[in-house]
Image: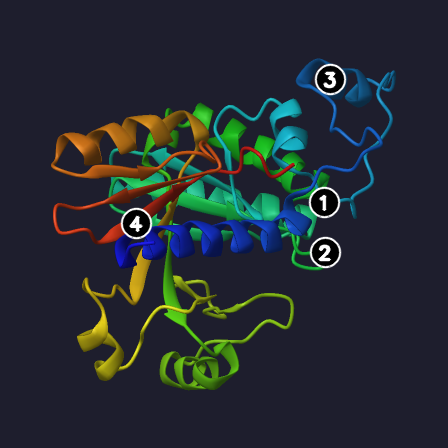
Amino acid sequence: MSDEKQQDDQVDQADQDRDDTQDGQDETPEEPQEVHAPDGRDAHEKGTATVEEPDPKVVLGGHGVEAALLDDWRVMFDQLHARFETGDFATGLTLVDHIGKAAEKADHHPDVDLRYGFVEVHLSSHDVGGVTSRDVDLARTISDHAGRLGARAATEKLQVLEIALDTRDLDAVRPFWAALLAYDTPEDDDAVVDPDGRGPTLWFQVTDEPVTEADRQAAASPVQRFHLDLRLPPEDAERRIKAALDAGGTLVDDAMAPRFTVLADAQGNKACVTTWVGRG
C-alpha cells in the first residue's frame, strides 16, 4: 500500500471513529419522543392537547428536531443553531432583549452573539448534554420574536469548525494543548474544548502516521498533522463541497457521505465536510 493511500485510509478511519464517539450523543430514542408540531402546540395552549408532553430530559437526535418543524434552526453537534439577519445593530439589540426576557421566563439560557447586521443563537440543555424539548420550545419563541422584527433566518451561513490533530499517543499530547489553549478535557471525548465556546474544538486522531522529523524524511509523501472538520447543515454540504471542488480541490472519499466527505486542496492537504445525517 502506498504512503498516500495509507494516509487517506487513516484519515477516513479516524473520522469514522470520532463520528462513532459522537453518535451516542446524537442518537434519537427508539420510543417516540418527538416534540409536537405547531398545530399540536396550539391545541395544547387552548387546553385540548392531543400530543403527549415530551420528556424535557430526553436528548433529541437530528430526526427528532426535524420532526419539530424548526425551519429557522439546524442541529450542529449537541446544539441548535440559528442566525437571524437583522440589517442593523438596533434591530439586533432589540431581538437580543426579547431573547433575554424569554430565556429568563423559561429559566433556560442560550448563547447569543450580537453583531452588526445579524444575531446568532446557540441552544443546548447542558444538564443532559444535548438538544431537548426545552431548547425546541425556546427556539420557537425566539423565531417568533425574530419574525415580528423582520429578521430573516440565514441557515445557509451556519457552520461549526473543528481542528483534528494526528497523534500516536493521545494522552501524551492532550495535556499540553489543554494547558496552552486553557481548554477543558471532557472525560467522554477525545478532544479539548473551549469552556466558553469561543474557539474551535481540537480533537485527536490516533494514527500510525509518521510524526517525527526522521519519520517524515523516511516517508514518501509529506505528512499532514492537522486537518479541518467543517460541520454544515445537510442541505448546504453539497453546495459547499462543489464550491471547494470548483476552486481546485479534489474528492478523496465520499463513501460515508453525507455523514462525512473527505476533500483535498491542490497540494493534497485534507479537510472533511460533515453533517448530522447518519448519526441518529
Q: Are marks 1 and 2 in contact (CB under 8 Å)?
A: yes
> Separation of disc 1 and disc 4 at Cα?
29 Å
Would you say residue 69 is visible in this rendering? yes
| Residue 152 visible | no
Q: Amino acid at mark 1?
A: Val
Q: Which residue is label 4 attached to?
A: 271
Q: Are marks 1 and 3 in contact (CB under 8 Å)?
A: no
Q: Quadrant of the N terminus?
A: bottom left
User: In this figure, which residue is indicated by the disc labeled 1?
Assistant: 59
Marks 1 and 4, the one that precedes in the sequence: 1
Q: Amino acid at mark 4?
A: Ala
Which residue in the structure is indicated by mark 2?
A: 128
The residue that disc 3 covers is: 42
Amino acid under label 2? Val
- Look at discs 1 and 4 and give the one toward the viewer: 4
Q: Residues within 10 Å of mark 3 (few under 14, many from 20)?
A: some
Q: Amino acid at mark 3?
A: Asp
Point out the frontmost of discs 3 and 4.
4
What colour-coding does the image apply? Answer: rainbow
Q: Secondary structure at mark 1?
A: loop
